[in-house]
Image: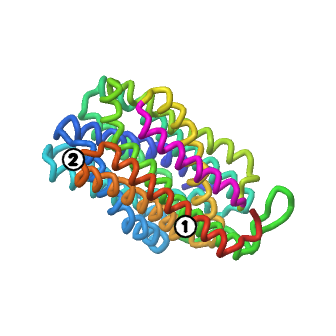
Amino acid sequence: MKPGSAKTGVFLIEGINAFATSYYGSYVYFWMKHRFGFSQADNLALSALIGFIYIGGALWGGRYAQKQGYFPALRLGIGLMSGGLLCAALIHNIPGQLAGVAIWTLGMCLMWPTLEALASEGESWTGLQRKIGIYNLTWAAGAALAFFFGGALIEQLGWASLFWLPIGLHLFQYVYLVFQENPQSPESTHESLATPKAVAPHENGSAISPEGARSFLRMAWVANPFAYIAINSVIPVIPDLASRLELTPMMAGFVCSVLYVARLVAFAILWFWPGWHYRFKWLASAYGTLLGSYAALLLIPNLWVIILAQVFFGLAVGLIYYSSLFYSMDVGDTKGEHGGFHEAAIGTGLFAGPATGAFTMYFLPRYTQSGALAVCGLLLIGGIVLWRLRRQTHPARH
């Protein structure tokens, strides 16, 4: 890309990617329920499959981008996502849908680590704080818009739009990328433009040691998968939640988009106020809020409780995710690989939460709340692990 437009182009591709992947990734569960009669347990199993592929795929995607270059990784990712959606659009049976989802997931595994690295390359610490903030706001806004308007789009355009609309957006990404790419631009390679940092400065002029920064990175890499255990145990059950509350897909999209809007607000606050960096009390508070709001969201079938719980849930997920991504890009200079580690941690949560919920529902079908309670148990274990890491590492700042 041309030097002056490099980061702007990255954020444009990212925003389109966020809308396209969130539209399909959120409403595919409605589609599977509508077309194939998938139960809540079936959709949780599908979500677990996506997470399982994402764990290894993200590690591969980050390494591919680091070794082969960022733009080749983006082109391959766009091609795989488009191919997977085309497969699902043309083969209307369960094996065809699963194959399409698997190929689409591998494409995402290339896109997100690469976009994270491109947004972060060549930045000072202050620049990194600003660019990660823009990056988070961009993808969160795309995801919120996709979920808010997704149900209405499906009602107006039909179920076929679940496939063809994202394919069209991915084709636009590809064309834009081809026309903007400059092979001589350092952003198109895996070379870092940033000067390695020994310490991370704070707004009060103090600094944290490299070992302290790495300890916070480890804690964030633990907390983030558990946040995604929670969020991806919620998304697959939204069709059933909507049915219990007698909501149409459009109304379900409006009501359940509160979570995404709250996460967007959290990203905006954390972008403007960097005082949360490398402070354990903020990470611990967010984790506790995550556990409480998740339990309320799935265990109390009241519309207003669900809306309020989503507010706190979105704020908590926002801080935990922001911590993982910021520390991943701030600690070390192999940003493509670190982006892959960050996304693989997300994949662990994508797999573990839905897999736990599906397992309990398949084997304890008479206990309707067994899935949610099992995930609450996992979140408690995550909190214990997080606290033990804190006690063992004794970071310099809290």
Who's the residue at 43% across and 58% down the image?
A: 349
List x then y, in percent, for residue 29. 29, 41
Instruction: Classify mark 1: residues with Cα within 10 Å, few (<14), some (14-19) or many (20+).
Output: some
User: In screen coordinates, is 178 left or right of 285?
Assistant: left
Looking at the image, which residue is at 25% across and 38% down? 31
Q: Amino acid at mark 2?
A: Ala
Mark closest to the chain's N terminus, 1 or 2: 2
Q: Quadrant of residue 344?
A: bottom left
Secondary-structure class at tag 1:
helix
**Numbered disc 2: secondary structure:** helix
Residue that label 2 marks: 88
Extreme-front residue of the structure: 366
Q: Residue at 29% x, 26% y: name it.
A: 157
Q: Which residues lie in the magenta part? A: 279-301
Q: Which residue is mark 1?
A: 385
The residue positioned 67% from the left and 68% from the top of the image is 194
Q: Depth check: 196 or 232 in front?
A: 232
Q: Is residue 185 visible?
A: no
Secondary structure mostly seen in magenta is helix
Q: Amino acid at mark 1?
A: Val
State the image coordinates of residue 3 (x, y, percent, origin top left): 62, 56
Percent x, y of residue 175: 40, 48
Residue 223 or residue 25, whichever sits in front: 223
Q: Quadrant of the C terminus?
A: bottom right
- In three-dimensional space, the C-alpha distance between marks 1 and 2, rounded to whole angstroms, equals 39 Å
Does the CB distance between marks 1 and 2 fall below 8 Å? no
Q: Which residue lies most toward the right here?
A: 205
Determine which quarter of the picture holds residue 152: top left
Q: Is residue 292 magenta?
A: yes
